[in-house]
Image (cartoon, rainbow, N blue to C red):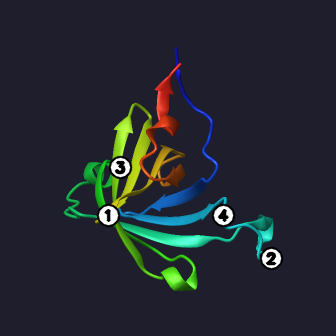
Amino acid sequence: MGKSLSPKPKRWGMIQYTILEDGNLHGIWTHSDKAGDGAPGGRRLFLEIARKVDDRHDTLQSRAQLVGAYNCAWVDEPTDLGVLQQLTIGQQGTVYTFEWRTATGVSFTGVGMRLGPTTLVVTFWPGADRQHTLSAS
């Protein structure tokens, strides 16, 4: 049988990445805690940049490969400007797995899919809670 997601956690978010020509990622994100504040659609939007740790992209094929480690920074509330973490992307078939980590452990975990050649959409939740990752049905 196919794979499915278990019920979503109470706090969760979405990020849409644009895959840049050099293989790095530019993201726009929000999550369930970022409600309202007069933002269109009722959610505030934030930015993230993820740069591949090994950025020696010699071929078009290597640029298209998303799996690997990234240095990651995002802008959050004014008190959290410049949050720096490491993002690791894995792959299970057509689904990508995500793990954002600091020196103290896993901050967020997620799953996502490519939508065409330059777009990647991800659902994420806090911590290393694996009960919400992909499970066989």
Q: Which residue is mark 4?
A: 33
- With respect to residue 111, does 31 lie above or below? below
Left or right: where does residue 45 sit relative to residue 20?
right
Taking the view exactly as shown, the residue that stands out farthest to the front is: 104
Residue located at (58% from left, 64% from top) = 29
Residue at (79, 65) in percent of width and height:
41
Three-letter amino acid code of the residue under disc 4: Asp
Q: What is the spatial separation of the Cα atoms under label 3 and label 1, in whole angstroms?
A: 19 Å
- Residue 30 screen position, x and y as percent: 62, 64
Name which quarter of the figure residue 77 lies in.
bottom right
Residue named by callout 2? 38
Q: Position of residue 18 (x, y in %)?
A: 49, 61
Asked whether the beta carbons under mark 2 and mark 1 sit within 8 Å of each other, the answer is: no
Tell me the residue that label 3 is attached to: 89
- Closest to the camera, between mark 2 and mark 1, is 1
Numbered circle sitting on residue 126: none
N-term-proximal mark, 3 vs 1: 3
